[in-house]
Amino acid sequence: MVFTNWAGNQTGVPAEVRTPASTEEVVDAVRAAAASGRRLRMAGTGHSFTGVALTDGILLLPGGLTGVRSWHDDRVTVLAGTPLKALNELLDERGLALANMGDITEQTVAGAIQTGTHGTGRDTGGLADQVTELELVLADGRVVTAGPGSVQQDLFDAARVGLGALGVLTAVTFRVEPAFLLHNRRRRMTLSAILGALDATTSGNDHLDFFWLPHTDACLVKTNNRHPGPARPPSAFKHWLDNVFLENTLFGATCATGARFPALIPRINAASAAALGDSESVDTSYKIFTARRDVRFLEMEYAIPRERLGQALRETRDLIDRMDWKITFPVEVRVTPASDAWLSTAYGRPTAYLACHIYRPTPHPAYFEGVEEIMTRLGGRPHWGKLHTKDAAYLRGVYPRFADFVALRDRLDPGRLFGNAYLETVLG
């Protein structure tokens, strides 16, 4: 079998593939790997752009580790391979919801939290910040449960964004709350206006997500705020128009046109900016948080101190103009509060995220390299599942608990049973 990720830029050929259906079968696989001197990784659904999931040893596929293990009043324990899409629906059936999430729901819960999937929120953090307990299989075959206030507190804080380096995650307990509605507003604003009111824009909304179209001054701004109801979901036609036709079918066609005729990209973006319109709806939270993404792309995203967001945006805009690069995809901006997970990109500081995307058939390494130089100069931390060039020497300087994470890994997996080339780069 050849494992290929969603974007098609990472492939690996494992020596053996297993699909465990229980924690016990994961233990068996870990012990088999150790006995045979092979390495082991468990993949998610391949939505990382890095080689974080690749292995030349035993590859575990998570399709058999799905479903809810137990329900509590304000918690739910799910098996690690459960897709976020399925979890949302299961929670909704019980009148429950996650407080925040990203926009991709095909990911497994384990893959999403291990790579630091975060979404956007003024007061609510990413998925790792909503975890209350983890079950892991360690390199010696032991099954451990880690949670706050336990003897495994350090493991809990390290393994929530653990890159699969500390053990194989088999179950996750999330904190949940009563289902709620979000008031979604989509409106066009200028980048100039946003830059002039960044603090007010980020502090004035529960959830803020905006997209700047290069070669224009136009942004699509999405704000989501809690709403008492009643629900006012978009009509079926409006949902199709915005989420299927405009953001996927038509956008895919414009990307293909730009790939063939790069000189047209500024005019294509100007036309897209002119077509941006205002709309609003009130709907179930997970339906507002999530989006459909059919157009394949490559992505780099950096987390920077929130107070440096304005500078990062201005420098990115000026760089694109100065280099005369033709960029079709918008630049996306999100925010989160500080996190206490050791390798969370938001660890210890209120954070802003700046994400650059490129149409998959037309990679643009110079664009990513140029923006990365800006982000690292501002103390940026690269998303663990998205493209970057940073290694352990750099990452040690931007993560205060990096050395503690590596020391814990040395203790739990001295033989690097869970290692691979990506981890050798980012962890040393």
Image: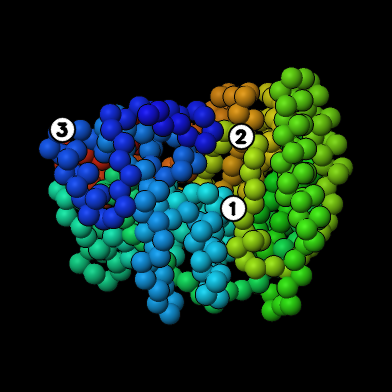
Residue holding disc 2:
296
The kind of residue on which mark 3 rests is Gly
Q: In this rendering, would 317 be left or right of 42?
A: right
Q: CA distance from mark 1 to mark 2?
A: 15 Å
Q: CA distance from mark 1 to mark 3?
A: 39 Å
Q: In this rendering, would 264 be left or right of 1?
A: right
Residue 338 lies, in percent from the top left, at 47, 60
Q: Residues within 10 Å of mark 1 (few under 14, many from 20)?
A: some
Residue 181, image quadrant: bottom right
The kind of residue on which mark 1 rests is Asp
Residue 38 in the image: above or below residue 332: above
Q: CA distance from mark 3 to mark 2?
A: 37 Å
Residue holding disc 1:
103
Residue positioned 71% across, 23% down in the render: 259
User: Along the line of sight, which residue is nearer the eye, 201 or 92?
Assistant: 92
Let me know if residue 35 appears in the view: yes
Residue 11 lies, in percent from the top left, at 43, 28
User: Along the line of sight, which residue is nearer the eye, 71 or 308?
Assistant: 71
Residue holding disc 3:
37
Secondary structure of the residue carrying tag 2 is loop
Residue positioned 73% across, 53% down in the render: 221
Secondary structure of the residue carrying tag 1 is loop
Residue positioned 76% across, 31% down in the render: 253
Choose the circle earlier in sequence order: 3 or 2: 3
Residue 151 in the image: above or below residue 345: below
Residue 406 lies, in percent from the top left, at 25, 45
